[in-house]
Image (cartoon, helix red, strand yellow):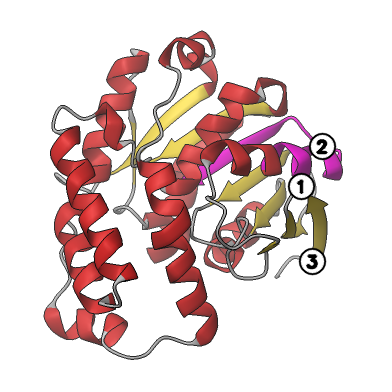
Amino acid sequence: MNPTITAHTLDVPGARLHYELRGTGPLVVLIGAPMHAESFAPLADLLADEYTVLTTDPRGINRSTVDDRDQDSTPELRADDLARLIAHVDAGPASVFGSSGGAVTALALIQGHPESVRVVIAHEPPLVELLDDRVAVRAATEDYCETFLRGDRVGAWRKFLATANLHMPEPVFMQVFGNEPEPQQAADERHWFANELRASSFWHPDITALRAVAAKIVVGIGEESGEQECERTSNALAAALDIAPVRFPGGHTGFVDDPAGFLPRLREVLTPAK
């Protein structure tokens, strides 16, 4: 039985956030960046039998609008948005599952607003600054962002996948990136490449502050992520915090590819926070 979903908006400084609620019980937040609420819907539906689940579009993406499209979407800004959302729904503190850029948001949340959080599951945060080869990865990231902003969308995505060590068969790549995107997708991609990606990837967490709350942090890595960039950054974060990473089914987007298969491991790490 599908849960009842209610959609809402919240005005925050410089933005108007779209968010959705479903289910009852302790609060769980599922977040991405730039991934928005729709991608988390199947997983949220499965969790709603036991939790109140909040999903949201990050500022400047999809249905969450911003006053200034040229303002960077930093982890601190998105964490402040999330803290305001948690306070607004008055169901916190929250267990927060963040994926990729959303994992960076979740880490910035527990770093800056620890009172809002029961546990943070940071699933494959792309924290380039923690890598030994960060100078080279940073240069490659700057290159594919500039490639996109020069108008070469296909070239930018090719460079992005190569840097991230993500493999996509050519027919699939052209099916996904070879056609003109819909207007909303085009706007979201541009905002990500221009104003969000670098702010997330180049963010350097306060390791001392995170070590102080390390008991409330889970670093998640996909079992199929291999030697991808986000596996390397996640291992580097876990090592810096002196905690063991937790393996989750699938790869970087395992919770989208097979939410039912992903769910049992997620429930395991959420249970202590109830």
> Left or right: 129 with respect to 196?
left
Type of amino acid at the residue the image marks with label 2: Ala
The residue beneath circle 1 is 13
Q: Earlier in the sequence, mark 3 or mark 2?
A: 3
> What residue is at 56 percent from the left and 50 percent from the top?
31
On-image quarter of the C terminus: top right
- Residue 43: x and y in percent read 55, 58
The residue beneath circle 3 is 7
> Which label lies toward us, 1 or 2?
1
Q: For the residue carrying disc 1, how many other residues have a C-alpha within 10 Å: few (<14), some (14-19), or many (20+)?
A: few
Type of amino acid at the residue the image marks with label 1: Pro
Q: Which residues are magenta?
A: 82-99
On-image quarter of the N terminus: bottom right
Q: Nearer the viewer, residue 102 or 30?
A: 102
> Left or right: 44 with respect to 54?
left
- Residue 142: x and y in percent read 26, 52
Q: Secondary structure at mark 2?
A: helix
Query: Residue 106 sits in which quadrant?
Result: top right
Where 127 falls versus 256 (above or below)? above
Residue 84 drawn in magenta: yes
Q: Is residue 78 visible?
A: yes
Q: Earlier in the sequence, mark 1 or mark 2?
A: 1
Spatial CA span between label 1 and label 2 = 15 Å
- Residue 23: x and y in percent read 76, 54
> Left or right: 64 with respect to 24?
left
Type of amino acid at the residue the image marks with label 3: Ala
> Left or right: 266 with respect to 27?
left
The residue beneath circle 2 is 87
